[in-house]
Image (cartoon, rainbow, N blue to C red):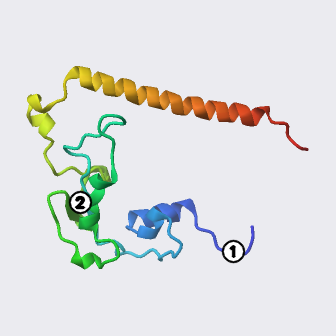
Amino acid sequence: MSGGSTTSTRSKRQSKLRGDPCALSGCLARKRAREEPWTQKLWGYDFRTNQHFTLKQDPLRREHLQDFVDCYLPGKDRAERVETERFRTFSYEELIARDKVNFDITWLKDASLEDADALLPPEVIAQEIVEDLEAALREFAAIADALSSRAAQPTDN
């Protein structure tokens, strides 16, 4: 082994458990592990609840993300951020107390779960599934074609 320092898998896991944001995001400037977590609070934005996008009928567009951008305040100090219905903070203590310490956090009520009339008609759901599967099949076919083309090319030895 060379004389350079290496980080073991175990110490990487320990860094993640201590809330080291660099261990989670893979940033270049690594922070040293410490007893007190580096991250004191996590900002979360619920973009799933009561949102419905499809590939053809209602595709996700840039304007759908504008509320998040307005809340996130890119380029500004995090201290200026304000909680909203969809954008809120969770303390380290709240997160660590969760079952299995996961980030699958829901705080908004899903209207479709409370009002059966708010659900899309079955024929619309079925059509969306068909469209999604067809789009996925086209993508896999393109990948298979690309792989076949690459395999058919002669290799230089």
Quarter holding the N terminus is bottom right
Between 101 and 70, the one lying in front of the other is 70
Which label's residue is closer to the chain start, 1 or 2?
1
Q: CA distance from mark 1 to mark 2?
A: 46 Å
Image-quadrant location for residue 153: top right
Number of on-image labels: 2
Quarter holding the C terminus is top right
Between 11 and 120, the one lying in front of the other is 120
Q: Can residue 96 be seen here?
A: no
Between 49 and 19, the one lying in front of the other is 49
**Would you name the residue on which mark 2 appears?**
67
Image-quadrant location for residue 113: top left
**Would you name the residue on which mark 1 appears?**
4
Q: What SS does tag 2 mark?
A: helix
Tell us which disc is closer to us: 1 or 2. 2
Q: Position of residue 101 (x, y in %)?
A: 31, 54
Amino acid bearing label 2: Asp
Residue at screen point 58% across, 67% down: 7
Say above or below: 117 vs 93: above
Q: What SS does tag 1 mark?
A: loop
Say above or below: 11 vs 147: below
Residue at screen point 31% across, 78% down: 76
Q: Position of residue 60 (x, y in %)?
A: 33, 46
Side of 154 where 41 appears, left or right: left
Q: Position of residue 147 (x, y in %)?
A: 68, 34
